[in-house]
Image (spheres, coloured by chain):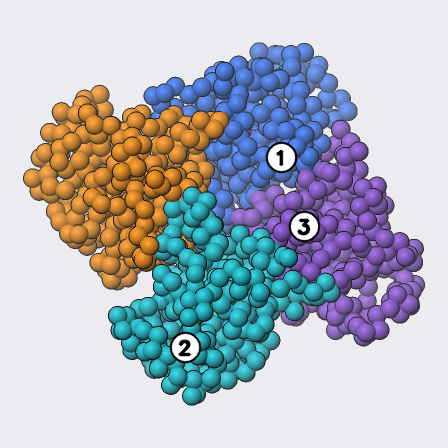
Chain colours: A purple, B cyan, C orange, D blue
Amino acid sequence: MPKIDLKFTKSVITKRPENSYKGNFGRILVIGGNANFGGAIIMSASAAVYAGAGLVTTATEPSNFTALHSRLPESMVVDYSDETYLKELIPTMNVLVIGPGLGTSAKSLQILNFVLGQVSAEQSLIIDGSAITLIAEHHLPFPTAPKLIFTPHQMEWQRLSQIAIADQTDDQNQAVLAQWRQHNPNITLVLKAHRTKVYLPDNSVWENTAGNPGMATGGSGDTLTGILAACVGQFQPADKAVLAGVYIHSDIADELTDDGNYVTLPQEIIPLLPKFMGRLASD
Amino acid sequence: MPKIDLKFTKSVITKRPENSYKGNFGRILVIGGNANFGGAIIMSASAAVYAGAGLVTTATEPSNFTALHSRLPESMVVDYSDETYLKELIPTMNVLVIGPGLGTSAKSLQILNFVLGQVSAEQSLIIDGSAITLIAEHHLPFPTAPKLIFTPHQMEWQRLSQIAIADQTDDQNQAVLAQWRQHNPNITLVLKAHRTKVYLPDNSVWENTAGNPGMATGGSGDTLTGILAACVGQFQPADKAVLAGVYIHSDIADELTDDGNYVTLPQEIIPLLPKFMGRLASD
Amino acid sequence: MPKIDLKFTKSVITKRPENSYKGNFGRILVIGGNANFGGAIIMSASAAVYAGAGLVTTATEPSNFTALHSRLPESMVVDYSDETYLKELIPTMNVLVIGPGLGTSAKSLQILNFVLGQVSAEQSLIIDGSAITLIAEHHLPFPTAPKLIFTPHQMEWQRLSQIAIADQTDDQNQAVLAQWRQHNPNITLVLKAHRTKVYLPDNSVWENTAGNPGMATGGSGDTLTGILAACVGQFQPADKAVLAGVYIHSDIADELTDDGNYVTLPQEIIPLLPKFMGRLASD
Amino acid sequence: MPKIDLKFTKSVITKRPENSYKGNFGRILVIGGNANFGGAIIMSASAAVYAGAGLVTTATEPSNFTALHSRLPESMVVDYSDETYLKELIPTMNVLVIGPGLGTSAKSLQILNFVLGQVSAEQSLIIDGSAITLIAEHHLPFPTAPKLIFTPHQMEWQRLSQIAIADQTDDQNQAVLAQWRQHNPNITLVLKAHRTKVYLPDNSVWENTAGNPGMATGGSGDTLTGILAACVGQFQPADKAVLAGVYIHSDIADELTDDGNYVTLPQEIIPLLPKFMGRLASD
């Protein structure tokens, strides 16, 4: 099984061309954060900005706008239930994230359904957290056009795939994915665990070599979605960008642990992104 | 009298097992923060997150949500007077804190009564600040099932125990506790003072060896509650976790003082938790 | 003319007694911050907390509560037009600040008048900014019981004293103060300028030896009020505490300038207070 | 073509005179930030404060007040659609910025038209982002009295000048500017690109020697407007101040890149301003 390691990741994270502008580095829309879970989408958006995304817009419950801007003036905001606005906005995006802190209410379902209906080919959609649960519970059909990247932890994967955690072997996982890929060949699975595995559309399965138990804290998954979105928005091909994003998140956490931290909080990891990625891009 | 010191604390704070997830490290609910004292619950929740709690939810006055998320996106929020929501949430928790900034209004009393009625065996409830005052003033009966940890300063202990500050000897304190433990054998008293003492359910009395007058500033007690909750959520047995939490808070403050700080503010102490605990867990 | 310098200031800032609690270090109420000038009272409250005040409460326009808590969870908040609440709160305070960002509207005047009517002997009242302008414009009588500390810049002093800036000599200033001290002998004037002068009730005039033009930025005066309040709340006698507070503010700014900063912003100065005061109190 | 480099910039950024007060360093009003783009005006105001502006007021959508104060208590706030308040405020200002996050709605247009009608001689008006787009779309006449500084990127310049990006040569740009300067001789163009060019009223064209692709991220342009405003408010003559501001922004970004950062976020650049400017002013 191929491993995701530093060397591989360095091959993906390239230097920026001298003559470039922010449109070259991805227009990202992160969607989530209800009235109770607003922090989740703040962490996702922050990770996307710090990981180099060109332009990040956050669609969330309006009660989260102020906290988001207090932490991250670099992101724009939009009411996640303003379908008129989103209908104009979504076609201008390269990568979308849906799920962090979205919740599983009727309103959450409505937003998810709307977004699933708007994304199109040439776009990548990262599906996380509550969005995975909602898709599983309501048997929502996957959109067939865009690239889909699911980022469940093992319990969410059980809900989505109907494979019990104990039975989540590569063979079983691949069998389910093979079925789904008949409808949308561009499905990636990032299965989060002690050693996260990534199942790519080309049927390869990659194992992450970084990560540690200090990451077992609220917000880790939300942070990962933002990093993945930024990577897919900046680097080619998207499959490799996903692998690189998984590694970046874990390796920064490993550095924090090596530096003596008992837990590796999202707000400690996120500000380290610009220098970590700078190191990856250098010679 | 046994002393709480570095060596003891190191014996409690263990390394995390490699293969773990956030559910292993405690689900914590901190309850408090009315419209005037919102900062108190923000400091409690922040301390819990930085001290390694797996998942922290903050139940508070909704006007505090934005400030909380601005400082701490890692915590979820819930309206502390939404009994429907809390009724579902509380049974999923391992440790609860009630009191920081709760206030003593009729609304505060209603919330306290509701929470006291919901906590059950297998859960730990840390009772602080206004919650202690309310219990004393209204002669509220203690819940008999959960582990109870009271964290009064000397004036609050006087209100609760009816022992005047000058008479708060170990004998007097133990006599009152012995009476209470007939109804709930799992009562711990953390009596905050120049040298904080902890009275455990096994009748032992421990004295903290750390602490300094720079900690005499608003928010110190609130910060302690969050650290205690995180420790009880992560380490076994709970009694030792409480002792360790008391020490961790004071020893970080001592380090700040040794480093030349005249006061040791909560927002200076809290970010030091991950590295301090990392040091405790190493070798 | 006596100079306020490092040596003098070190003689005022004493070590904290080992066995102390937050009530020993002053209960401070800062009052100000209307809907347009909320930042002023945030800076005042922050400076008070970082300079070691035991407990700080901020009375301000409620629209400022969230920003205050986002920056400073250590302070409590209260609606500055809630007279019922303030009437109970004010008698529990040692030091009050009124003025930073208060504005000069009818509402501001109402609040100022209410506070002037509530302060009593044994309390110190620091009067700054808009409060000085309001007193001058409306010819408000000074309260006779509390210690009063005015902190005008030269234009505000002109409004209050009717002495044109060009004529603000020590003799002229002392003449006005002598008149006022017939009604309240405890009046101090902190006249802010390139070299700030302090006119004490004992008729001495002190000149500050620290300070630099990098401090010429919005919020400098607001920051000073918080430092003064914390010093008066902690150190004896109050007159010396005022002198020390003036020096502390300027000398931290000088250190920032010596360290290469072109401007010395309040949010750069404030976090340096705990270590600077620790240095003053040592040996 | 003259180059904007370190040596030139050092000649503009002078030491502050010892005896000065905040009014000497510019009264700045930044106008922008609608309900969706509030972060833009927060970054502009922050950059102005950190670059040494004496007093900064932010006119924006009131929903942005709290996030602004959470990050920047040094700035005052005002509702950008409160014409009564603005009518009194604008004549007291030295430099105005309009555009960051202003949006292009009917309300945005109303605000822009109002401001264009209020600025007068002796004032400088920096026109950025949405304000440029609105002027282009609605063929708004330029005010003839104040100094005007346009800061478009190439697409905005195309909208304003009707010169397609591919045709934006110095000759073409100068031809358009020459026409405009018949009505207002004090028009400056800061044309943002890989190597930003500045077209001064004296017909000289300057090229920036600093800058790198890490700056291609949301908020770069907003940050520049704040730095320009602060420089024009502090340094003489205004034309040289504009050139210096362009360089300062880019050179700080270059230092962050040299220090290993993959992207140079506004919130990383802004806090570096006081020391960078201190270095420019020294020796």
Tell me how far mark 1 sits from mark 3, CA to CA: 34 Å
Do marks 1 and 2 both belong to one polypeptide chain? no
What residue is at 22 percent from the left and 32 percent from the top? C198
Residue C116 rendering spot, x and y as whole percentages: 19, 49
Q: Residue A227 location, x and y as percent?
A: 72, 50
Q: What is the x, y in percent for residue C3?
A: 24, 28
Q: Which of the chains bears the disc numbered 3?
A: A
Label 2 neighbourhood size at 10 Å, few (<14), some (14-19), many (20+)?
Answer: few
Query: The residue tagged with tag 2: helix, strand or loop?
Result: helix
- Between circles 3 and 2, the one closer to the viewer is 3
Secondary structure under the numbered disc 3 in the rendered image: helix
Quarter placement of the C terminus of chain A: top right
Q: Which residue lies under the disc numbered 1?
A: D220
Question: Looking at the rendered structure, which numbered label has been put on residue C68?
Answer: none
Task: Look at the image and tell me whether residue A3 can be seen.
Answer: yes
Q: Which residue is mark 2?
A: B110
Callout 2: residue from which chain?
B
Q: Which mark is residue A258?
A: 3
Distance (Cα) linking label 1 and label 2: 50 Å
Dot 1 falls on which chain? D
Amino acid type, residue under disc 3 in the picture: Asp
Residue D173 lies, with reference to residue C239, above or below; the image says: above
Where is residue C94 drawn, in percent x and y?
A: 24, 53
Amino acid type of the residue tagged 2 in the rendering: Gln
For the residues beneath circles 1 and 3, the answer to whether they share a chain is no
Is residue B63 in view?
A: no
Indicate whether B121 appears above or below C257.
below
Camera-side mark, 1 or 3: 3
